[in-house]
């Protein structure tokens, strides 16, 4: 599929979204099989570390395993990411319960806005995954694990292998999200023949603790990756310490815009960094603790393993947390993740990292504004940032580089393109001045009619009402005959029409003006308790009145 | 005659997609079953709090989630971590359950969750509420004779609810009409911004009880009047 239509910025964003979506998918699935109830808190202020605006914790070992399996790749056609959930008894018998598949097919949606629609739909898909992981049979089994059996997970990347699920397995689709490079689909195939795994058949044995599953001798696929217990606490004594890789600190908060149609603002904000977490990469032989790989946090924002992913973060000379899709009219304002300000202290001798990397850590300018006339501003920002050097190590406050550009209309035609004078109605000069054009009016834009029949019982309204919403509803206009009632053509004056238009602009009611309004509102509020009491007393009468209406 | 350019669909009424779910439950399962469905829908129809900044950009807060175990059904579901939202749903479901109970043993009723947008109208017309999605759960309350039946009912209703969750997710996945993301001045016409930690789309819950004669008594009317008087 040609993706020349996708800007390089969009492509980078999309790859990043898909990568983090894959990681979060694994987290949700594995956490749903831990055997415990999961609880995360909502936060009204964006913390800058919650991908897809959802509070999903990152278990370090799980992220590590997922990244190992992905090895820098992204799901693509024929290369699916699979999370296999299986059960292992205390006697050593094991059985595959589910395979969760994150796949990509070739069906592209070129029109969709990456930084906005795709992102939000991925968020919705994660919510669906949260819901669906609780309704497959393995959930209830996993809640009871510990004594007779444990639940294990295994992540692999490549072709989906369903043969271990037994005969007659069922599939549930969690959802799909179309993107310009393909359609992401998330589904689960699960075993239904669980009869002999009923927990009542097991005798009580001592709890299985400390099981480290390295491999299964009877696995048909010798190259398969090792299994891991979902209840990760069982593996505490295996010696490997997984530093808390908080991937979520890498990029994530996005800002969305309901920009005015003629202009969109793209704000690039340098991050507030906390002390960066130690980072484990595949290129390092030992876990690196305590080193500030700032270059990972700054310039390599867009990929965890820049080379492998091919998401040219090396090109990004400036510490952009997240670059929004610029050809969408939804620019992004980046918000630093941390509560503490400042750049992390850069060690004088990092174990890895080059001189060039160190330079990239430097902050570009303070508060310089650039106007980019063309959409391709990444080059501009590069020159901007490369021009600075030598400021490494000093903390910086939030700084902003603002690009102001003109882009196409937000979703609809800009207001100034359609003026009342263009509307072919008589007495246009009497029309309300601040008309809310119907194409800006969300109430008027008809939603697309559903193409498929609802699996549930009947859409009562969606059939039969006007479904004339094919294509771009904002560009297609239809002509309808507009005949004001009781009017005659070409005879002046049209009394009713004139009256109608004039009365659409009445003078403001004095009681609505602020001064008087505030006064009377205070009085109203004071009298409310009395009124309420009276009304409550008369509830029976009102109820009776209502009955008469039945 | 005058001809006026209007976008297609402007004249006829806006589409409101409607989904109907049916469950048969024991009396003591009504609340949990309703909450499971309503919370699952609202999980998909709530976002983090919007914070508008200059130039029309906004950022979105974070939605937390938590598992809920049912006591009377072999079932668990995920809901948004918001005590305010949970309280609001429990209140509505509690009233529904009470109404069902007081209507007699053959309780039948339905509870509806409607998502709507507000449209400001010019004087002298008052604001319109235009629904864009309507979920209706039809409930049939059954009475069971003994403990064995109750145990089976626990499992069966649990399985049924699993199916309902899958159905809901199917609908959500169609990515059909959602209100446009609003500007700051419009946000209260699209979202309920009154909660402190999450932001669901504007919604209202109503219910109907069908008594044994098949007539339906709408309690929405009564509540509407009460609410109006309470300002």
Image: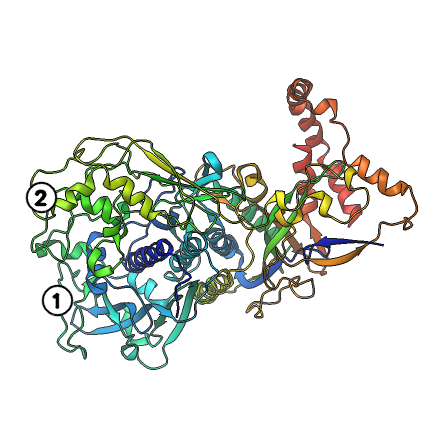
Please give the name of the residue rendered at 56% of the width and 67% of the height, measured from the top-left corner.
A456
Q: Image quadrant for the N terminus of chain A?
A: bottom left
Q: Nearer the viewer, residue B157 or A404?
A: A404
Circle nearer the viewer, 2 or 1: 2
Q: Chain of mark 1?
A: A
Please give the name of the residue rendered at 64% of the width and 63% of the height, measured from the top-left corner.
A462
Please give the name of the residue rendered at 76% of the width and 27% of the height, measured from the top-left corner.
A507
Q: Where is residue B87 drawn, in percent x and y?
A: 49, 42
In the image, residue A32 above or below residue A331: below
SS class of the residue under badge 2?
A: loop
Q: Is residue A348 left or right of residue B15?
A: left
> Which residue is denoted by mark 2 in the rendering?
A350
Colouring scheme, one of rainbow, by chain, secondary structure, one colour:
rainbow
Tell me whether circle 2 and circle 1 mark residues in contact (CB < 8 Å).
no
Query: Label 2, label 1: how many angstroms apart (C-alpha)?
Result: 33 Å
Q: Is residue A45 left or right of residue A96?
A: right
SS class of the residue under badge 1?
A: loop
Q: Where is residue B104 drawn, in percent x and y?
A: 64, 55
In the image, residue B222 above or below residue A195: above
Q: Nearer the viewer, residue A88 or A287?
A: A287
Residue B84's disc is: none
Residue A214's disc is: 1
Residue B10 appears in which quarter of the rendering? bottom right
Q: Where is residue A101 drawn, in percent x and y?
A: 33, 68
Q: Nearer the viewer, residue A492 or A288?
A: A492
Q: Nearer the viewer, residue A9 or A49?
A: A9
């Amino acid at each position: 599929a040609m993706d020349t239509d996708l800007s390089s910025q969009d492509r980078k964003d999309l790859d990043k979204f898909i990568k983090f979506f894959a990681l979060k998918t694994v987290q949700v699935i594995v956490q749903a099989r831990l055997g415990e109830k999961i609880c995360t808190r909502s936060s009204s202020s964006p913390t800058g570390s919650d991908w897809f605006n959802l509070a999903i914790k990152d278990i370090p070992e799980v992220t590590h395993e997922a990244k190992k399996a992905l090895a820098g790749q992204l799901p693509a056609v024929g290369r699916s990411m699979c999370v296999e959930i299986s059960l292992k008894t205390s006697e050593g018998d094991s059985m595959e319960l589910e395979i969760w598949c994150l796949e990509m097919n070739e069906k592209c949606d070129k029109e969709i806005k990456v930084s906005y629609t795709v992102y939000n739909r991925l968020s919705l898909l994660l919510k669906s995954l949260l819901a669906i992981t609780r309704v497959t049979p393995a959930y209830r089994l996993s809640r009871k694990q510990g004594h007779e059996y444990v639940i294990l997970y295994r992540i692999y990347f490549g072709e989906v292998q369903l043969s271990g699920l037994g005969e007659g397995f069922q599939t549930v689709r969690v959802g799909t999200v179309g993107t310009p490079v393909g359609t992401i689909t998330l589904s689960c195939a699960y075993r239904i023949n669980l009869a002999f795994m009923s927990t009542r058949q097991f005798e009580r044995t001592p709890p299985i603790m400390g099981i480290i599953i390295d491999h299964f001798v009877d696995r048909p696929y010798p190259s398969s990756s090792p299994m891991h217990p979902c209840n990760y606490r069982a593996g505490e004594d295996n010696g490997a310490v997984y530093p808390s890789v908080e991937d979520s600190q890498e990029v994530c908060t996005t800002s969305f815009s309901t920009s005015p149609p003629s202009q969109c603002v793209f704000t690039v904000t340098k991050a507030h960094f906390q002390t960066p977490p130690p980072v484990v990469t595949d290129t390092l032989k030992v876990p690196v603790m305590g080193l500030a790989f700032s270059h990972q946090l700054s310039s390599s924002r867009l990929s965890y393993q820049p080379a492998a992913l091919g998401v040219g973060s090396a090109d990004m000379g400036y510490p952009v947390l997240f670059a929004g899709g610029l050809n969408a009219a939804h620019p992004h304002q980046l918000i630093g993740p941390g509560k503490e300000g400042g750049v992390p202290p850069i060690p004088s001798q990092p174990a890895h990292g080059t001189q060039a990397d160190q330079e990239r850590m430097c902050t570009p300018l303070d508060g310089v504004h650039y106007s980019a006339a063309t959409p391709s501003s990444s080059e501009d920002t590069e020159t901007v940032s490369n021009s600075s050097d030598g400021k490494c190590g000093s903390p910086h406050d939030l700084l902003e580089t603002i690009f102001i550009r003109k882009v196409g209309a937000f979703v609809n035609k800009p207001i100034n393109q359609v003026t009342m004078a263009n509307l072919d109605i008589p007495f246009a000069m009497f029309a309300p001045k601040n008309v809310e054009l119907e194409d800006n009016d969300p109430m008027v834009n008809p939603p697309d009619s559903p193409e498929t029949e609802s699996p549930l019982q009947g859409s009562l309204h969606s059939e039969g009402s006007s479904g004339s919403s094919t294509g771009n509803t904002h560009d297609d206009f239809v002509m309808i005959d507009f005949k004001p009632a009781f009017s005659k053509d070409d005879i002046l004056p049209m009394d009713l029409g004139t009256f109608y238009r004039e009365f659409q602009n009445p003078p403001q009611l004095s009681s609505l003006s602020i001064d008087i309004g505030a006064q009377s509102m205070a009085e109203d509020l004071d009298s409310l308790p009395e009124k309420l009491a009276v009304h409550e007393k008369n509830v029976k009468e009102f109820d009776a009145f209502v009955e008469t209406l039945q | 005659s005058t001809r006026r350019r209007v976008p297609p669909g402007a004249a006829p009424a806006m589409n409101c997609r409607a989904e109907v779910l049916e469950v048969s439950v024991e009396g003591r399962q009504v609340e949990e079953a309703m909450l499971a469905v309503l919370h699952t829908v609202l999980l998909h129809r709530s976002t983090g709090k919007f914070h508008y900044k200059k130039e029309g950009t906004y950022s979105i807060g974070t939605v937390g989630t938590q598992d809920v175990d049912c006591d009377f059904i072999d079932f668990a579901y995920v809901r948004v971590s918001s005590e305010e939202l949970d309280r609001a749903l429990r209140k509505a479901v509690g009233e529904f359950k009470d109404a069902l109970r007081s209507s007699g043993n053959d309780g039948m009723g339905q509870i509806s969750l409607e998502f709507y947008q507000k449209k400001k109208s010019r004087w002298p017309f008052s604001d319109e509420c235009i629904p864009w999605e309507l979920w209706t759960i039809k409930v049939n309350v059954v009475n069971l004779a003994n403990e064995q039946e109750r145990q089976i009912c626990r499992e069966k209703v649990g399985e049924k609810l699993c199916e309902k969750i899958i159905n809901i997710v199917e609908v959500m996945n169609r990515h059909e009409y959602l209100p446009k993301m609003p500007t700051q001045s419009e946000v209260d016409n699209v979202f309920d911004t009154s909660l402190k930690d999450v932001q669901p789309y504007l919604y209202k819950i109503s219910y109907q009880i069908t008594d044994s004669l098949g007539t339906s008594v709408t309690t929405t009317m009564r509540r509407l009047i009460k609410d109006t008087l309470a300002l």
